[in-house]
C-alpha cells in the first residue's frame, strides 16, 4: 500500500534514476528549509520567500555541500556521484554548471534518504551534524 509517508525498500530506491531521486530531494529540501524558517521566525510570507530562496538554490545547496563533504556514508556518496554526473533534461538559469550538478547530487541523496525513511539522517546532513 502506498501512502504519503510510506517507506520504500532500499533496493527499489537505489534502482530509481538519480534525476528521479533529485526530483524528490528538491521537494524535501525546500520543505525542510521552509519549515525551519517558519518555526524560527515571525517573518511575513514575502520575507520568508526571499530569505529561503538563498538556501533553496543550486548555489545555496552547493555551499551547504561544501560544509558537509566527507560526511556521506559510502551508499550516500555513490548516490551523490550518480546524481552529480547524471544527464539532466534542463539547465539551471541562475547557477554555474558545477553548482547545478553538485546540487542535483545532493538532492538525489536527500530523495533516497526520504524515500527509505531515513528522516533523522536528512536532518543531520542539512544541519551539518556529525553522524
Image: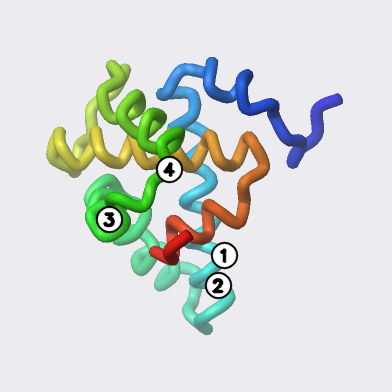
Q: Helix or strand or loop: what does disc 2 sit on? A: helix
Labels 4, 3: front one: 4
Label 3: which residue?
Answer: 60
Q: What residue is at 36 percent from the left and 36 percent from the top?
A: 77
Q: CA distance from mark 1 to mark 3?
A: 17 Å
User: Which badge, 2 or 3, comes first in the chain's sequence?
Assistant: 2
For this rendering, which residue is in front, 110 or 131? 131
User: Which badge, 1 or 3, comes first in the chain's sequence?
Assistant: 1
Q: CA distance from mark 4 to mark 2?
A: 30 Å
Q: Give above or below for 101 relative to 41.
A: above
User: Which badge, 1 or 4, comes first in the chain's sequence?
Assistant: 1
Image coloring type: rainbow
Q: Helix or strand or loop: what does disc 3 sit on? A: helix
Label 4: which residue?
Answer: 73
Q: Which disc number belongs to residue 38?
A: 2
Q: What residue is at 69 percent from the left and 29 percent from the top?
A: 8
Q: CA distance from mark 4 to mark 3?
A: 22 Å
Labels 2, 3: front one: 3
Q: CA distance from mark 1 to mark 4?
A: 26 Å
* Residue 80 image position (x, y, % from top left): 35, 34
Label 1: which residue?
Answer: 35
Q: What residue is at 34 percent from the left and 59 percent from the top?
A: 55
* Residue 19 image position (x, y, % from top left): 41, 23
How many marks do you count on the picture?
Answer: 4
Q: Are marks 2 and 1 in contact (CB under 8 Å)?
A: yes
Q: CA distance from mark 2 to mark 1?
A: 5 Å
Amino acid at each position: 500500500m502506498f501512502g504519503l509517508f510510506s517507506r520504500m525498500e532500499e533496493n527499489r530506491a537505489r534502482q530509481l534514476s538519480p534525476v528521479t531521486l533529485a526530483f524528490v530531494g528538491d521537494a524535501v529540501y525546500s520543505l525542510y528549509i521552509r519549515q525551519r524558517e517558519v518555526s524560527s521566525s515571525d517573518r511575513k510570507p514575502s520575507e520568508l520567500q526571499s530569505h529561503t530562496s538563498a538556501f533553496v538554490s543550486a548555489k545555496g545547496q552547493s555551499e551547504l555541500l561544501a560544509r558537509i563533504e566527507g560526511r556521506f556514508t559510502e551508499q550516500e556518496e555513490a548516490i551523490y556521484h550518480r546524481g552529480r554526473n547524471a544527464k539532466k533534461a534542463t539547465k539551471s538559469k541562475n547557477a554555474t554548471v558545477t553548482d547545478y550538478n553538485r546540487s542535483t547530487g545532493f538532492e538525489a541523496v536527500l530523495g533516497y534518504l526520504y524515500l527509505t525513511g531515513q528522516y533523522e539522517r536528512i536532518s543531520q546532513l542539512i544541519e551539518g551534524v556529525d553522524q
